[in-house]
Image (tube, rainbow, N blue to C red):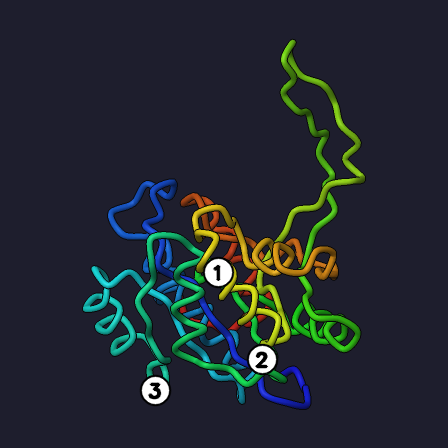
Amino acid sequence: MVSRQGKTYVIIVAAGSGMRFGAPLPKQYTMLMGRPVLVHTIEAFRRLLPEAEIAVAINPDYERLWTDLWATHGHGDMPQTVYGGASRAESVYNAIRALDPEDDSVVMVHDGARPVVSGKLISGLFVALDAGEAAVPAIVETDTIRRVTPTGSETVDRSKYFRVQTPQAFKASLLKAAYSMALEAGFEKFTDDASVAEALRPSCVALTAGDVRNIKITHPLDLAVAEVYLRADNPEADA
């Protein structure tokens, strides 16, 4: 459990179609150790931040499926559910409106397909928010990176690049103002919540230590990797 003074809200984005996953159902509904990925994600936050208020953004086409899955595999009350939009940013905006967080609270936005979030990662975000308004976990890039040029490609300095993860954390006053601006600018131009925040307030985003185990389920093989990490944390977990 992670301790913090003040109210925390968690938005879990699970409205995507998961086309790259290549399965009949979106990846967030796929079974992992006998339970849907999304259930693992929600319960990780309930364990780490038991006082947080959670909203899950889903595609309305899967509402009945999600209700049935939670009834079978979830524990306790089903978290608040909101309809996602045509883009990730629109889904987050819908959840912000539904939660209506107080300006002095913290809002975390997380991918529904990242079920291995850790308390250490969340604690680092809270520390960063004590001194700023927005924080994003990131992993140092270790692979050689090349970029395409008009004549071919070239190696770039990898020390200048990081792989961004979620949850991304914000002071609620900043995130609400940023998404009000995004509503006018058009949601489709934004790839994550940090980009929405810095469009309103440049250089507001601090980087914190990410976690290599905090993987996003994108391909079927990722399920096996996530299971290894989850079992390491809970060796007695049922299959």
Q: Residues within 10 Å of mark 1 (few under 14, many from 20)?
A: many
From the image, which quarter does the N terminus lie in? bottom right
Q: CA distance from mark 2 to mark 1?
A: 16 Å
Residue in front for this viewpoint, 136 or 37: 136
Residue in front for this viewpoint, 168 or 196: 196
Q: Is residue 213 above or below residue 93?
A: above
Q: Residues within 10 Å of mark 3 (few under 14, many from 20)?
A: few
* x and y percentages locating residue 206 in the rendered image: 74, 61
The numbered mark, 1 or 3, whose residue comes first in the sequence reads 3
Q: CA distance from mark 2 to mark 3?
A: 17 Å
Q: Amino acid at mark 3?
A: Asp
> Which residue matches tag 3?
77
> Which residue matches tag 2?
48
Q: CA distance from mark 1 to mark 3?
A: 20 Å
From the viewer's perspective, tell me whether residue 161 is left or right of residue 170: right
Q: Residue at x 55, y 85 (%)?
A: 102
From the viewer's perspective, tell me whether residue 231 is left or right of residue 121: left
Residue in front for this viewpoint, 141 or 94: 94
Q: Amino acid at mark 1?
A: Asp
* x and y percentages locating residue 129 in the rendered image: 72, 73
Q: Nearer the viewer, mark 2 or mark 1?
A: 1
Q: Nearer the viewer, mark 1 or mark 3?
A: 1
The numbered mark, 2 or 1, whose residue comes first in the sequence reads 2
Q: Amino acid at mark 2?
A: Leu
> Which residue matches tag 1?
111
